[in-house]
Image: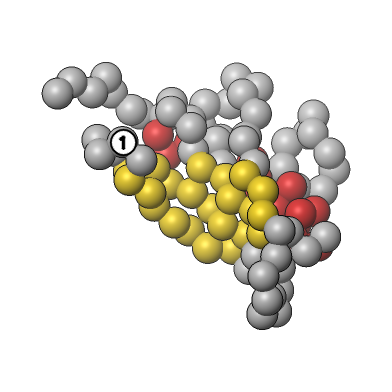
Amino acid sequence: MLESWVFDLNGLEPVPAYLARPKGLCHQAPAVVFNHSHGGGYDIGKKEFVAGRSYLQPLPYAKALTDEGWVALCIDHWCFGERSTRRRWRR
């Protein structure tokens, strides 16, 4: 099961994320934070978690981890994915 979340980590901008849970999970489960790769794909970000990348393992990490019973979270890091158009923030 894949959920879209949005965090407020710095009070300046929303941080989009995906949370993947094993199907039918009704108890506590181990969790992991997945950090997407760089690979020059600034537009990809957290999508790599569910779609995979050719230079990573064949099965996307969201599927591989949930198949093993893990809950997994992946955010778009600064300048990647939905945050790829991030402009410099000033207070």
Would residue 10 appear left or right of 27 to someone viewing this image?
A: left
Q: Is residue 23 above or below residue 21?
A: below
Q: Is residue 26 above or below residue 42?
A: below
**Where in the figure is residue 12, as x and y percent of width and height?**
24, 35
Would residue 72 appear left or right of 57 to someone viewing this image?
A: left
**Where in the figure is residue 27, as x and y percent of width and height?**
68, 76
Q: What residue is rendered at 49% in x and 38% in y?
A: 76
Residue at the left extreme? Answer: 91
The quadrant of the picture occupied by the N terminus is bottom right
Q: What residue is rendered at 60% in x and 20% in y?
A: 40
Would residue 84 appear left or right of 53 to someone viewing this image?
A: left
**Residue at numbered disc 1:** 10
The quadrant of the picture occupied by the C terminus is top left
Q: What residue is rendered at 61% in x and 24% in y?
A: 38
Q: Is residue 88 above or below residue 48?
A: above
Q: Nearer the viewer, residue 86 or 66?
A: 66
Q: Is residue 51 in view from this perspective? A: no
* Number of numbered discs overlaid on the protein picture: 1
Q: Nearer the viewer, residue 15 or 57?
A: 15
**Label 1 crowd (10 A; few <14 / some 14-19 / many >=20):** few
Q: What residue is rendered at 62% in x and 59% in y?
A: 20
Q: Is residue 27 in view from this perspective? A: yes
Q: Please name the amino acid that badge 1 sits on.
A: Asn
**Where in the figure is residue 17, as x and y percent of width and height?**
49, 49
**Where in the figure is residue 58, as x and y percent of width and height?**
85, 43
Q: Secondary structure at mark 1?
A: loop
